[in-house]
Every structure is written in C-alpha cells, then in structure tokens.
Image (tube, coloured by chain):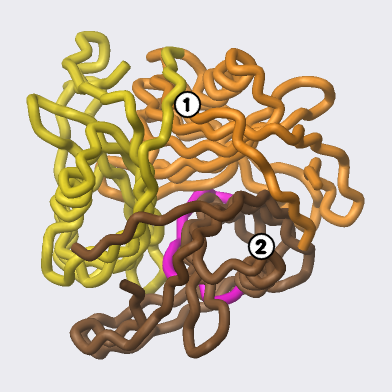
Chain colours: A brown, B orange, C yellow
C-alpha cells in the first residue's frame, strides 16, 4: 500500500443548493476554499441519480440512472486534481421508500438537500492514469 | 452552496449501550460533551430499525420498520440544535444475513453494539424550517 | 454510553495495492504508522468479498461470499488491538452493475483500487470479549 501523512488546512460544513448537481456542488466548495486535496462525507436527498459501476474486465464504467427521488444514506469521497481541474471522486449509497439501497460511484444527481463535511489537506493529490486498473489514481 | 469554516473543539470515540436507542445514545454523547455542532460516523449492529424516507413531492417523511437484527454497515450524520434541543441527523445503511442492504434516515433502532466517532465544532449549528424543501436545515 | 476524548496523532491518505486483501492492507497501514487506535473511511472497488452478518440470537457470525467484481460504495471502521495484534473492524457497502447494494462486516476482499483516509489516536483501543453481546468490544 502507498500512503502519505497529510496536514489539514481546514474543515468545512456545507449545505448544498437545492436543484444544483450534487458532485458539482462539492467541487465548487473545494474551489471556493482553494483545496487541491480533501476528504468528504455527506448525507441528504436527491433525485435523478447517475450511478456508475466499474466493469473491471472491460476497464470501462457502466452507468445506470435512477429517475426518482432518493435518500443519500451515505456519501464518501475525496477531492483531487484530474486533468488540471478539481475532481470530487464521489461514492454514495441511495435509498428508496421501501428502504431498498442502491449504491455505486455517483457521477451526478440533482440535490434536494445535502449536508457535507469536508476536510482539506496541504499536500495536493493528483490523479494519473494507472495501467494496471485502467483508473485515474492518486499516490 | 452555503458553507462555513469550523474549528474543532474535540474528538470522541464512544461505545453505545446495548438495548438503548441508537440515535438517543448519539444525542446523549453530544450533550455529555456539550456539543452544539458535530459530525459523526458509526458502525455496529441493531434490531428493530425505524427507517425514514422523505417523500419530496408530498414534503413528508414515510416510515418503514424492520423488526429484525441488522448490521449497521455505515452510519453518517451530524449534530445540531433543533427546536432548542440536540438533534442527531442520522442516516444509515443496514444489512441482512443475505448481505441485502437497506438504507435511509435512521429515526430509531435498538443497539446491540455501536462504535462511534464524533468530532465537535465550536460554531453552533441551528436547524430552521426551509420553505423550498420542507426540511429543517442548517446554514 | 461509554466514551473517551481522543487526541489525534496523525492523518493519512492511502492507496491500497491492487490484488492485495482490503482489510489486511488497512491493518498494514496501521502497523506502518504505529497506530494502536484509529478511525478510517474508504471507497474503491474489489472482487470476491467475504461479508459477515452477526446472528444476534446465536451470537455467531454468518458469512456470505460474493465472487464477483463490486464497487466499494462506502467503507467505515476503526483500528484497535485484538489478542495482541492490530485489527481493523471493517464495515462496507458494496454494489453491483445494476446498482444493487450489498453490505455488512467486511472480512476480506481482493482490492482493485482503494482510497483510504485514516486518522490515528494517541489513546490505545483494546478489544475484549463482552458477555452481553458475544462480541469483542473496546471501552
């Protein structure tokens, strides 16, 4: 495993804007506080979620869209640089009225409400293409 | 998005009491350490979980009860003031023996075991009614 | 509820090794940074996951294995001492291409990629057998 000790530069609580995009809001927060690296957690509610799954054999993402209102039961991820811009790598667990849980890499979703905790780090994280997995990884 | 930089006032690990209520235990922890704002994560096991889903069209919560033993695979949330008292906004992902995941806003559940990390903040968070969503939101 | 204020001794970001075991990698990270206590969060992708569910009536874990590639939508847990060694108590929510979520106590899984945030604490955590639940608990 590769690892790095990090120093925190700040800690933030945010309330995402209703009707905005969930991931874009987190990236805007990172830009607003000048963060090139960070770790976040969030809960809330969304609609119309694009959830990605990585097909490990084909080395390609597959997408499924849930065009419905959903709870965001858990959302975890991190902020890094990707191709010169801020990228919030966002995974989430969503749920339906029945309690059924759906999950994966969250590409996009329309916010009803979102409560976010972001911790930023001094050391930048930069994503680069990794041959072994086909993914853009940091460290 | 609205956000606030926060300063941490403390960090706590807690073990929830067997047979107590999951959310009440987290609120008791916040009271015990005089926290008016905080962010928590938890894992554990419960039984008889009341899981809520927000009906975005009707602006009302719907409830479903799972009267069975469940793992708490992931629990995230935050502590704020609501109507003059401490409120732990608690989302959770639960699971059955088959591995099936259930998730949503966790109103109540009976603790078997619970391991909690709570980080408290100096700046109070106060929930107030938000017209646009029908929810009680902070910031 | 029992609790303890903790002082952080460090904060780390790690990238887990492709083809290694998910939980062993987290335990190796804890050993590498000399942590006897910590809290972690992670996201990533795995295959062949052994997911455990605690049968509360029988006081025994039940295991189910998913021999397939899965997203790690959310992973939370903590590092403590158990029987003289480092143990990473690891819960996770996994997902399939359909978005279906699976969850529980994650005993083992083969890493494709894993991004971990670990926060370590000065005060050691030691797990001991708890008669009431049949589990090994700290505090």
Task: Residue lying at the far right in this picture: please name it.
Answer: B131
Look at mark 1 in the image and give the residue it sits on: B12
Q: Quadrant of the N terminus of chain B?
A: bottom right
Disc tally is 2
Q: Tell me, yes or no, whether the highlighted magenta stretch contains residue A102.
A: yes
Q: Identify the main secondary structure in magenta.
A: strand
Q: Is residue B64 visible?
A: no
| Residue C122: image location, x then y, percent | 33, 29
Rendering coords of residue B31 (x, y %): 64, 16
Tell me residue C95's x, y (percent): 35, 64
Residue at point 19%, 63% (across, down): A1
Q: Is residue A53 left or right of residue C54?
A: right
Residue A73 visible? The answer is: yes
Asked if residue B90 is positioned above or below residue A2 in the image, the reply reads above
Q: Which dot marks residue A46?
A: 2
Rendered position, A5 above or below B106: below
Magenta range: A97-110
Please check whether the numbered discs 1 and 2 fall on a single chain: no
Q: Which element carries disc 2, helix, strand or loop?
A: strand
- Residue drawn at point x = 71 percent, y = 42 percent: B61
The image quarter containing residue C96 is bottom left
Q: Tell me what residue is drawn at x 28 percent, y 49 percent.
A: B99
- Return the residue nearer the eye: B18 or C128: C128
Classed neighbour count for the residue bearing mark 2: other residues with Cα under 10 Å, few (<14), some (14–19), many (≥20): many
Front position among marks 1 and 2: 1
Q: Residues within 10 Å of mark 1 (few under 14, many from 20)?
A: some
Q: Identify the residue shown where x is 68% and y is 64%.
A: A33
């Amino acid at each position: 495993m590769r690892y790095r000790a990090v120093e925190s530069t700040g800690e933030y609580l945010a309330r995402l804007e209703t009707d905005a995009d969930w991931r874009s809001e987190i990236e805007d927060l990172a830009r607003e506080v000048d963060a090139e690296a960070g770790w976040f957690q969030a809960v809330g509610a969304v609609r119309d979620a694009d959830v990605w799954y990585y097909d490990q054999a084909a080395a390609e993402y597959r997408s499924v869209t849930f065009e419905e209102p959903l709870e965001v039961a858990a959302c975890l991820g991190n902020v890094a640089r990707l191709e010169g811009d801020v990228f919030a790598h966002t995974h989430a667990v969503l749920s339906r009225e029945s309690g059924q849980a759906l999950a994966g890499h969250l590409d996009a979703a329309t916010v009803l409400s979102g409560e976010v905790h972001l911790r930023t780090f001094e050391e930048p994280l930069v994503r680069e293409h990794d041959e072994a997995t086909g993914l853009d990884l940091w460290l």
